[in-house]
Amino acid sequence: MSMINYASREINCKIVYYGPGLGGKTTNLEHVYGKVQPDTRGKLISLATETERTLFFDFLPVDLGTIRGFKTRFHLYTVPGQVYYNASRKLILKGVDGIVFVGDSQVERMEANQEAMQNLYDNMAEYGYDLTSMPFVIQYNKRDLPNAASIREMQAALNPGWEVSEPARMRPLPDPSHPGEQLIEQLPTGEWIERAPYLEAVAVSGDGVFETLKAISKLVLKTMA
Amino acid sequence: MPVSAASWSFTEDDFGAITKALERFLADCNARCALLVDRTGQLVATVGQRPDFDPTAFATLTAADFSANDQLAKLIGENDFSSLFHQGEKESMYLADIGRRVILVVLFDSRTTLGLVRIKMRQTVVELTQLFEIVFARGGSAEAVPNILAGADDEIDKLFQ
């Protein structure tokens, strides 16, 4: 739920980074924190265990610029990835405007990725949110590792597409960031499917981190326009 | 959509009435500062002495605190905890639920007592609940809030070039 404050001329939106444990969600926020001008961001709040595993959430507010005289302020949250923290993970999703799923590209983490994705769908559904009809992007992180699965495999496992039911949307939609690929396409079976936009990243070195943030923020603002 | 996530907005008149109620409450119980935070962690209003901490972070943690305690309440068979109290050596805070959507936080020190804050807070919660019920009933419909981003696609594109 975005909040527009007319007094301070701010648009506040909530973005949640979701995904399996040790996938790089906190690293994404730390990179943003380290790179943006101090006057355009707030404090990075981390509720973590002594071993730096996220216990409740990380939180970072950033300003991304001004539209129509309103400052666009994005509240970035991460959730704890570890399976047994589901109760606190679900709480963070309350009032979310956009979701970034941070997937771990390592082959061995495929099952954990799929479990986290299923958990995201389930938790969103419990709030009555439909993930397929809200701003949602997938970041394939750790692309630099030798044991990284191919993008094709990642897409097949985590982003196979959901059925398009609105006739008006049943037409090919090219993926602007991946020439030759489609976000909406018709399968040989005749069924129309839509996939979430995806980005590749190496969050530890910052590759793809801002691209992901830009992609999700833009989707969130476009939904409001 | 669940009640807690629906959009809502308030007008200048609502804001004036809310501020007035909170100013009266602060004067009555001699507390330092009151903040209104919505359940998703957004700061709605601050009244009284300007806090010397980061209010955005404070709002986020307040909502998290309340949400976590809600779940604890459910585990022990309660519907929710409608108020929370955190005691410090010098500063203390008292939090109360307003209509399941907003949290009122009051910060106070040794110039007042928990008993007085609690009594005055109870009256203020009733008053604010009534004010917010009107706001929630109106919702965030298009008539009430003009969409400031309508047709701003070009500007959004430019922002991310």
Image (spheres, rainbow, N blue to C red):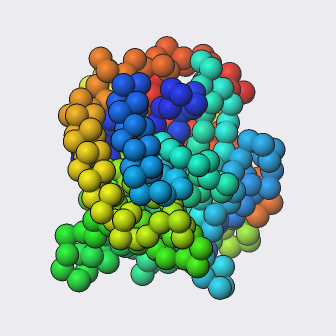
Residue A18 in sight from this viewpoint: no
Left or right of A70: which side holds B133? left
Front residue of A189/A123: it is A123
Q: Position of residue A47 (x, y in %)?
A: 58, 72
Name the residue located 73 percent from the left edge and 52 percent from the top edge.
Answer: A32
In the displayed structure, would residue A20 be above or below residue B102? Answer: below
Front residue of A106/B151: it is B151
Front residue of A46/B100: it is B100
Give the total of numbered labels. 0
Q: Position of residue A214 (x, y in %)?
A: 64, 39
Left or right of A67: which side holds B11? left
Q: Position of residue A31 (x, y in %)?
A: 75, 57
- Image quarter for residue B15? top left
Name the residue located 44 percent from the left edge and 43 percent from the top edge.
Answer: B23
Q: Position of residue A200 (x, y in %)?
A: 66, 52
**Quadrant in which the N terminus of chain B appears:** top left
Left or right of A34: which side holds A94? left
Name the residue located 74 percent from the left edge and 42 percent from the top edge.
Answer: A40
In the displayed structure, would residue B75 be above or below residue B158? Answer: below
Residue B131 in sight from this viewpoint: yes
**Quadrant in which the C terminus of chain B appears:** top right
In the displayed structure, would residue B1 be above or below residue A125? Answer: above
Name the residue located 35 percent from the left edge and 50 percent from the top edge.
Answer: B102
Left or right of A40: which side holds B79? left
Front residue of B17/A172: it is B17
- Image quarter for residue B65? bottom left
